[in-house]
Amino acid sequence: MAPKAQKKPQGKQMAKSSAPHKPKNSAINASRLMKYSRARIFQRKAAYKVKKVKTPAKKSAEKAAAAAFVVKKIGGDKNGGERKVYKKTPKSLPTQVASRKVQLRPKKTFKKHVRRIRSNLAPGAVLILLAGRHKGKRVVLLKQLESGLLLVTGPRKLNGCPLRRVSQRYVIGTKTRIDISKVALPERLNDAYFRRQRSAKKSAASAGGSADIFAKSDAAYAVSAERREDQAAVDKALMGAIKASGDGPMLRSYLRSLFSIKSGQRPHAMVF
Amino acid sequence: MGKLDKFVQVGRVAFIANGADSGKVCAIAEIVDQNRVLIDGPCTGVRRQVCDMKRLHLTGFHLPLPHSSRTAVVRRKWLAAKLDERWTGTSWAKKLEARRLRASMTDFDRFKCARAKQIRNRIVSVAMGSLRKTSSPKLRKPNKKRHLRKA
C-alpha cells in the first residue's frame, strides 16, 4: 500500500479558539440519554492525554482544612499523644459520607422557570379582565414581563385601568387586535417598577419584632410622578394607534364598555 | 305530520345533518335498503358513499338522475340544474348561514351589533313617540300593563 502523504500542520499551536465550543456528546432523547457513554467520550476527547493539574484552589482548601484544627498534646500512655481539636465545631459531623447523587435534571429556581404565554395573547390584543378591581374591563395588552405577568393599560382615559400587571389566568384574550408597533414603551416598565412598596419600618418590625405594634400603618398609596409620566406617554401613543386602526370610534366605545355574560350566552360556546 | 311531498328517491337532494360532511347537500344516487342510501355530492365536496337516512334531511330539490349514476353524471346534472345557487337562495340555507355568522362573532362584533340595535331602536322609539303625539287620543292611550312595568 502506497504511503499516504501525511500533511501534519507543523508547529501549529493549540491556540484557544474563539469559536463557540461544539459539544462532543449529545442527548438522544428527552430524558438526556447520551449518545456516547462515559468511556467512549473519554476516548473521543483524548482525555488520557490531558494531565491532571492540581489546581491552586485545592491547595488553599487543604490549607483551610488544616487551619481549622489545633493540634493538642495529651497525656497518658499508648493513645497517640496528640489530638486534633476543632477551633470552631462544624455544624454537622456526619458519620457517613453523604452520597453525591448526580442530578441529571437539577431543580430549577423560580427565576429560571419557563414563562409561557397563551397563543392568542399577542401585544396589541384586547383582553377582558375577569378578576380584580378592574374586572369586566376591556384593556389592551402591551407586553409580557419577565415574571410572566402581562402588562396592560386601559387606556386609562377610556376605562380607568392604569398601566398594570395582570395574570394570564384571569384574562380572556379576544380576537380584536390593535397595531401597537408604533407605540414605544418606556424602558423602565418592568417587574421591579410595579413591585409593591412596603415601608421600611414595617419590614423591620416583621423581621425584628421590636417595633411598636400600635404604630400607624403606612399612608395611603400615592401615585408617583414617574407613573403619571409613563401613563400619559403610553396612553397618548395608544390612543393614536386606536385612532389609526380601522374601527377607531367603535373601538373607543368598546374599550369604555364593560363585559358581562347575558342571559342565554354560553361562554364555552362563544368566540371571543 | 307535514305534507308528504319529499320522497326518498334517486335524484333527491338531501342535506347532511351530522357527521364529517354535516352542513353539505348531496344527491341520492341509489337506494340501498329501508334505511340506507348511496349519496354523492361532487359539487359540494361529498364523497360517494352509503349514508343512513337518519343523517339526511330531504330538501325540496330533485335532480332527473337515472339510478346508480356515476359521479360524473351527477356532477353534470347538478351543474345543469344550477343547484348551488338554488340551494343558497333558499331560506333554509340563509338561516344556516346566519346561525354560522352569529356563532363566529367575536366580542367586538357582538358589541358593534348591540350598539347598532340600540341606535336603530332609539330612532324607532323616537319616531313612534312623535307619531303617538300627533295621533287621536284613543290611539294615544298607552298600554296599561306597559305603563305599570315602566314604574
Image: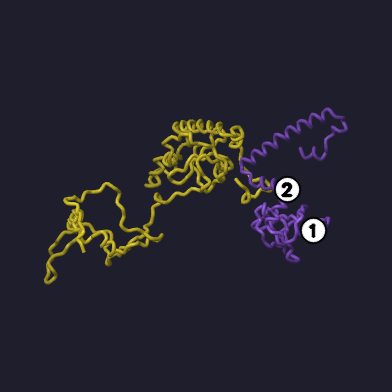
Chain colours: A yellow, B purple
Comparing labels 1 and 2, the label whose residue is closer to the camera:
2
In the image, residue B51 lies at what x, y percent?
A: 69, 62
Q: Mark 2 = which residue? A: B82
Which residue corresponds to the image point at 51% horizontal and 48% vertical from the top-left?
A: A118
Quarter of the view holding residue B33: bottom right
Mark 1 burial class by Cα count in 10 Å: few <14, some 14-19, many 20+: few
The chain holding disc 2 is: B
Quarter of the view holding residue B117: top right
In the image, residue A197 lies at what x, y percent?
A: 43, 40
Quick check: can you spot residue A155? Answer: yes
Name the disc covering residue B7, or none.
Answer: 1
**Element type at marker 2?**
loop
Quadrant of image for the C terminus of chain B: top right
Left or right of A25 in this view: A52? left
| Residue furthest top as drawn | B134
Q: CA distance from mark 1 to mark 2?
A: 21 Å
Name the disc covering residue B90, or none.
Answer: none
For the residue pair A65 and A115, the one nearer the viewer reads as: A115
Quick check: can you spot residue A223? Answer: no
Three-letter code, disc 1: Phe
Looking at the picture, does residue A206 appear above or below residue A247?
A: below
Looking at the picture, does residue A103 appear above or below residue A232?
A: below
